[in-house]
Image (cartoon, coloured by chain):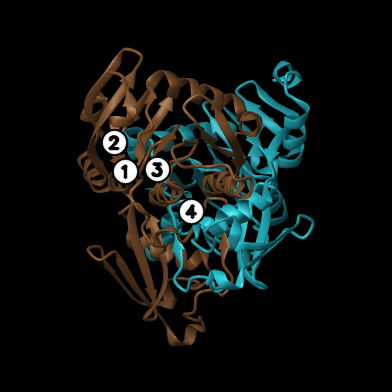
Chain colours: A brown, B cyan
């Protein structure tokens, strides 16, 4: 990693500084634990104000905000090209882009009345109330995490066949209790919690495993159901880590093979 | 693959039949092309009607629809538990779930007035008008695709450091012209198109490369900008493939190392 970093241009280094954040983590392998600094991707919140009306808040990386705002309006069919833009002002401190379109362009400033949520997600998670801190004395060993991840990967049959879905599971420290797959990482977790509610399966004091990245809305979803431990095969975002820290959730990322990173509340990982 | 399939239980086979679809594809390696059947994940559209008002349309996998609807309402804070649900009827032919909540529960049936789009996406892509068929005589060789993918992966510096972002690029057959990264696969592509519009960079007759899965809304986004060739490192969904076929877009998936799958309009791939 260090040798590779030396070859990176100044421009790219600047972009990385903007888009990433260094955090202290604990890396766990079969040989034990080590404290080190890791780099996680920053998660930024950008509100687009179109013709003085709030249109949308996008969770994104904090670069190319002007390009993102214009691209979003194009994709939504709210502008057709550059000529439709009369004003475009980015305030990256407040996380706001103000856009004004020409009066003659005939585009309304109203957001669409129907709401469509794609396979990638797109939920109002941040709009709800912040959940209470998760209190739980549950403990798990690294060995148990590795065994659960093995079982989790065994369960992911559709993924193995198509490479196109995310998986999620509710577990106790020894077994998978509920498993689901969906093309959306949000949906896979919602299916778990929906089934738990319908079948009276408790979630408190249990674990969620996800194949997907842990962004802020995934963390909030899990904390709302009082789940103290979230294990991901993939990476967390900076805001995911911050919320895990604030809400008392033990967050484990990059749980692959016999290794993992602990980002927050390592007290729930038993052993040395 | 075949040996593994034999060990799969009847229940899992049934789920896979429901969640996946077999399609004819062309696999390209350095040794040439072969026609074969591949399995892609199905993309399904589920509309949740809450207290007789349309709340949201989710793009999802077509299983566990009842669990998904309940989990979504929980995550959005629109119900608190099973007791809030008075009626729950799934119509999987129409792709509709009707939910009625108790009068005393005090939850409104109005969708939130502000719209939040998470890093995963959540756009109104399917609500816009269907774009016109993309007409373009551009041709590319397998060798050129492999070379572009190499360059694309070299550019993905933030991904290499964090494992937490998606990348997208606009290219011609020889070079990357615009490159972007974002925690959301939709955002990465929107940033490309936004920059192209602001800097008068044409997109017609060019290629888009994405690190992310190709679902229907990604395909629509690309077709709207008249891009005839979409190359993904990852998997497409069934609806992504169908739209590519209908809209005249050459869709290439699993472009990794010296191999790729061609899903639609293979005429743009030069050579035998």
Circle on res. A248: 1
**Disc 3 element:** loop
Whether labels 1 and 4 belong to a single chain: the reply is no
Q: Which image quarter is the C terminus of chain A in? A: top left
Q: Rate crowding at label 4 as few (under 14), some (14 to 19) or many (20 or more) other CA atoms within 10 Å.
A: many
Q: Secondary structure at mark 4?
A: helix
Q: Position of B15 compared to B102: left or right?
A: right
Q: Depth check: B257 or A148 in front? A: A148
| Image mark 2: chain | A
Percent across and percent down for residue A181 are 61, 39
Q: Residues within 10 Å of mark 2 (few under 14, many from 20)?
A: some
**In the image, is A246 to the left or to the right of B29?**
left
CA gap between label 2 and label 4 equals: 32 Å
Mark 2 and mark 1: Cα distance apart in space: 7 Å
Query: Does A164 appear above or below A50?
Result: above
Residue labelled with disc 3? B165
Front label number (2 vs 4): 2
The numbered dot on residue A265 is: 2
- Of marks 1 and 4, the one in the foreground: 1
Q: Are marks 2 and 1 in contact (CB under 8 Å)?
A: yes
Q: What crowding class fits label 1: few (fewer than 14 Cα within 10 Å), some (14-19), or many (20 or more)?
A: many
Q: Which residue is mark 4?
A: B186
Q: Which of the two labelled residues, at mark 4 and mark 3, occupies the earlier sequence position? A: 3
Picture coordinates of residue A106 (x, y %)?
52, 84
Asked whether the residues under marks 3 and 1 belong to the same chain, the reply is: no
Mark 2 on the same chain as mark 1: yes
Q: CA distance from mark 1 to mark 4?
A: 31 Å
To the question of a shared chain for discs 2 and 3, the answer is no
Marks 3 and 2: in contact by CB < 8 Å? no
């Amino acid at each position: 990693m260090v040798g590779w970093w030396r070859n990176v241009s100044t421009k790219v280094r600047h972009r990385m500084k903007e888009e990433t954040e260094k955090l202290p983590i604990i890396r766990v392998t079969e040989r034990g634990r080590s404290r080190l600094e890791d780099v996680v991707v920053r998660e930024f919140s950008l509100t687009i104000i179109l013709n003085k009306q709030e249109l949308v808040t996008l969770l994104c990386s904090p670069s190319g905000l002007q390009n993102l705002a214009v691209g979003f309006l194009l994709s939504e069919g709210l502008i057709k090209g550059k000529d439709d833009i009369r004003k475009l002002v980015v305030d990256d401190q407040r996380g706001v882009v103000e856009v004004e379109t020409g009066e003659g362009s005939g585009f309304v400033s109203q957001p669409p009345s129907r709401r469509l949520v794609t396979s990638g997600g797109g939920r109002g998670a941040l709009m709800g109330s912040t959940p209470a801190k998760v209190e739980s004395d549950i403990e798990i060993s690294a060995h148990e995490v590795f065994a659960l991840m093995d079982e989790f990967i065994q369960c992911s049959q559709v993924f193995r066949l198509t490479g196109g879905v995310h998986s999620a599971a509710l577990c106790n420290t020894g077994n998978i209790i509920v498993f689901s797959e969906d093309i959306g990482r949000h949906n896979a977790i919602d299916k778990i919690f929906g089934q738990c509610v319908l079948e009276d399966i408790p979630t408190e004091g249990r674990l969620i495993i996800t194949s997907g990245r842990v962004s802020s809305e995934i963390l909030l979803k899990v904390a709302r159901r009082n789940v103290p431990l979230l294990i991901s095969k993939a990476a967390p975002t900076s805001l995911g880590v911050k919320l895990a820290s604030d809400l008392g959730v033990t967050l484990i990322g990059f749980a692959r093979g016999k290794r993992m990173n602990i980002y927050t509340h390592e007290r729930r990982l038993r052993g040395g």
